[in-house]
Image (spheres, helix red, strand yellow):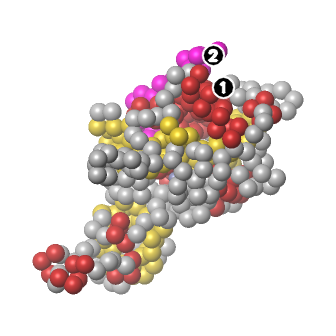
Amino acid sequence: MLKVNEISLPPIGDEQVKLLERLSNACAVSGDEGEVRKIVMEEIRPYADEVKVDALGNVLATRGGSGERPLRVMLAAHMDEVGLMITSDEGEGIYRFESVGGTSATDLSGKVMWVGKEHIPGVIGLKPIHLLDPAESKRQFTIDSLRLDIGPATGRVKIGDRAAFATTFIQQGPSLRGKALDNRLGVATLIELVKHASPHIELQAAFTVQEEIGLRGARVAAFSFNPDMAIILDSTPAYDLPTWDIDENVRYNTRLGAGPAIYVADSGTLYDPRLVRYMVEIAEGHGIPYQIRQPGGGGTDAGSIHKQRVGVPSISVSVPGRYHHSPAAIVRLSDWQHTMDLVATALFLLTSEVLADER
Ligand SMILES: [Zn+2]
């Protein structure tokens, strides 16, 4: 059997972490993914056979595919992140907004944000605790009650501008911390896989838009590619702090340090059992740690990809991360490395036989 190190994918080093840093610090709230798209285009253009940006803003790139009818394998990673959209200007640098993607008023209140293409700093103001009466302190926030304050610098923020959490990426020992690691980790992984693609398959890379507001970009990307199968790369929430429950946290979804999370089911998809089996076999056969993501809420771009055209056998593989959809997520470098190893090995050894198996 082939060993992982026979695959030409280099281990994650400074170059890959620097790329993730640029991707994490870039702002790409759903529907405004231009900053991340620009980095993706720069990185993959020299390697892809064909690259285009479709009508919604997805980056669609293909590479490889020798022989008469190579297996068409779509790899998808969403470029967008949660945040907010400016909806009205109340003067004096105060703006109303709507949330974009899965964030609540509680998640947003008191947070520092970067607004618009210039990353203008702003804060979502909170009434100081000194001024709260007892009834107010128990009240739930609504988005409507919050305002973004950038100070009176008129004309720089426009209606429709997006704002993202103002967080600068850092590496802390074995951990990486930054905003939007859901899903800049998937984007960075897919960039590496395009750079080091195995020529025997036709790699169809989709860097998708608008995942966080309903898997919209992936839907048209899958239609366009018409793939034989799909692998979705994302980062899934790890709910693994030690004392959530009385004795031990038994409600974890995934855990940091336990390797890539292979999906069996989520709220939008029942994953193809042949591909689940294949991923598990690859991991076990090559000594790559892995975990099965515990079924539950949330989902990935697979939710729209697997229902495209006549159906697309799909599997998702995610890097586990704590505190997604908040200003700072934490992930382990080792989980990212093992995710890269697993997907690269799976692609390197992939043949159409996988789909000829019994379900
Ligand atoms: Zn995601």
Pointer 2 residue Cβ closer than 8 Å to ligand 1: no
Pointer 1 residue Cβ closer than 8 Å to ligand 1: no
Q: Secondary structure at mark 2?
A: loop
Report the magenta residues as a range: 1-23
Identify residue type, mark 1: Phe
x, y percentage for residue 78?
Answer: 56, 51
Q: Is residue 13 magenta?
A: yes
Mark linked to residue 83: none
Instruction: Read off the residue under disc 1.
Output: 348
Instruction: Read off the residue under disc 2.
Output: 2
Locate residue 153 relative to residue 158 in the image: left or right.
Answer: left
**Residue visible at 42% across and 28% down in the picture:** 13
Instruction: Single out the residue that lies furthest toward the left.
Output: 130
**Residue visible at 78% across and 36% down in the picture:** 358
> Depth check: 184 or 51 in front?
184
Quick one: quadrant of the C terminus?
top right
Identify residue type, mark 2: Leu
Quick one: quadrant of the N terminus?
top right
x, y percentage for residue 258?
Answer: 43, 35
Q: How many marks?
A: 2
Query: Residue 278 appears in which quarter of the rendering?
Result: top right
x, y percentage for residue 27?
Answer: 44, 56
Are the residues tagged 1 and 2 within 8 Å (C-beta)? Answer: yes
x, y percentage for residue 190?
Answer: 57, 39
Q: Is residue 14 magenta?
A: yes
Q: Residues within 10 Å of mark 2 (few under 14, many from 20)?
A: few
